Image (tube, rainbow, N blue to C red):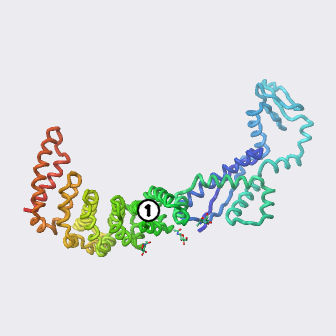
Amino acid sequence: MTLKLKVSVTMRPTSCRNRRASSSCFTFAFLLLLLNFCHIASIAGQKSESALTVVENTEGGGAEEEEMTVDEEEEEGELEVVKPTAEWQTLKPGQAVPAGSHVRLNLQTGQREVRLGEEQMKYRTQEHREQEEAQLSFSPEELKRAMKKIKEDLNTGRKDPEQQDSVASKFRPLEELKKDMAQLDMLVETDFQIMKRLLDQFNNSNSTTEQRLSILLELEYMVHQVDNAQTLCSMGGLQLILQGLNSSDFRLQESSAFVLGSALSSNPAVQVKAVESGALQTLLTSLATAEPLHVKKKVLFAVASLLRHFPYAQRHFLSHGGLQVLSELFKADGGGILRTRIVTMLYDLISEKELISQLGLDSALDASHDERVRQYSEVSLQGELLEKGWCRLVPQLLESTEHDFREKALRALLAMSPVCLDQYRSDSSLLGSLVSLRVQYEEMVQSEMIIGEENGYFSEIMELIDALQIKMK
Ligand SMILES: *[C@@H]1O[C@H](CO)[C@@H](O)[C@H](O)[C@H]1NC(C)=O
Ligand SMILES: *[C@@H]1O[C@H](CO)[C@@H](O)[C@H](O)[C@H]1NC(C)=O
Ligand SMILES: *[C@@H]1O[C@H](CO)[C@@H](O)[C@H](O)[C@H]1NC(C)=O
């Protein structure tokens, strides 16, 4: 791909009187260039060869005039000594003039004026002026050449020492410029460049686990942006993350799962790429084997992000024994945090399928909707839930002391009721739980009302209990 950049350089070449000044003029021009380039490169989203087109702006008349005006201003500020020119110029109070200058009083304005004396005028020959210009400033033509040179040097990284010597002798500041550019390059490093650097470091066999962990932390931050997450995939980062998930170091597993989950969240393109890369199998293995609770939590987060609104992945999750793995986790989790997350995930999956079929009741349907309905119809979630014993598992979450956990359990129980009702009815511990919870929440709703809260959180939970009890009658 070739990007064409048009850079309008409105530099007044002669305003750069000394080497330092011209260097900073260049720096400014290149800052503009770099900013433009990085901006466009980041839009294009990939590394691109650039073709720089420099268009010099020569409007504004003769350089000589400019030179002199600018000089005056510069010198005035610093030295308070006027540098006379061939033209008369007004002297301000307190300004000094060099020896040999010609000074007169303007009778109309009452101000003193100065210009070069006769001797100085003679000394300032054409040849001298050219020489001065060549040393201290660049003409637009030279600027253009210099830029081309830099571009070529940077692009080809040419090693011809003779060429480089001649470049260096003609355009002394080039080496400095390149240094400046490298620094600017660092300053305006794009997300693309950052991710490339991070992935390269992550993939470097010399990197320590600590370094990899901090890289994952940075990546996790970046992939919240949809574009960045997709860039991660196109750079082959997904494979690296999956390897991290497969690692024997549980800290790497945890951080990798975190990056993966964040990259997958609400990002269909990444969800598809992940399934294609075999992420589902790796995640399931990891879910079944991961040890500490906090690692399991992050892996579950990645699984939930992968399955969300993605019936194809859901179908494969079920056919690969996903619900079996989840029920092992559910049984092993005494604390209830993992149980709640699992139940919430199941509830979300049931709800999104429900929502799609409800939308189907509207008459205005498009083809993509039909396709979605078809794909969801292949996800036999409810049947699997019944078959894998979830009608008996979810009620256990009601035994938790956390209101939030109970609420999630009640919502899931209601969502599963179409297939689970028979089992609910024969579940004596569920019946008992509902009765005692109802008493408890009734009291709490009373207290809520005393403090003036009509439709508080506890009334909400009580409504869920009521709805479930009505279904079970
Ligand atoms: C790893 O480090 C060694 C020695 O410091 C070095 O020679 C080698 O090039 C490094 N490998 C990579 C992939 O950077
Ligand atoms: C990681 O490094 C290997 C070689 O060490 C290379 O083949 C692979 O492409 C690299 N992966 C990424 C994503 O940079
Ligand atoms: C994970 O490890 C297993 C065996 O240890 C291997 O078969 C599998 O290919 C690995 N997966 C990834 C994504 O590296």
Q: Name which residue lies at 14% across and 51% down.
A: 462
Residue 69 placed where, x, y %? 76, 39
Q: Callout 1: 10 Å neighbours few (<14), some, many (20+)?
A: many
Indicate left or right for 58 with 402 as reference: right
Farthest residue, direction left: 473
Residue 444 can be seen, yes or no? yes
Percent of width and height locating residue 435: 9, 55
Q: Position of residue 463 (x, y in %)?
A: 14, 53
The foreground one among 137 and 390 is 390
Instruction: Classify mark 1 as within 8 Å of ligand 3 or not, answering yes or no.
Output: no
**Which quarter of the picture shows residue 15?**
top right
Quarter of the image with the C terminus in it: bottom left
Q: Quadrant of residue 467?
A: bottom left
| Quadrant of the image occupied by residue 255 | bottom left
- Taking depth in this image into account, of 243 and 377 the one nearest to the observer is 243
Q: Is residue 384 left or right of residue 149?
A: left
Q: Amino acid at mark 1?
A: Leu
The number of callouts visible is 1
* Residue 231 percent location from the top left of the image: 49, 64
461 over 429 or under it: above or below: above
Task: Write the residue at 81% across / 24% down.
Answer: 107
- For ligand 3, the image quadrant comes to bottom left
Side of 45 relative to 445 (left or right): right
- Residue shown at 63% from the left, 55% from the top: 33
- Left-right relation of 186 to 328: right
Disc 1 target residue:
252
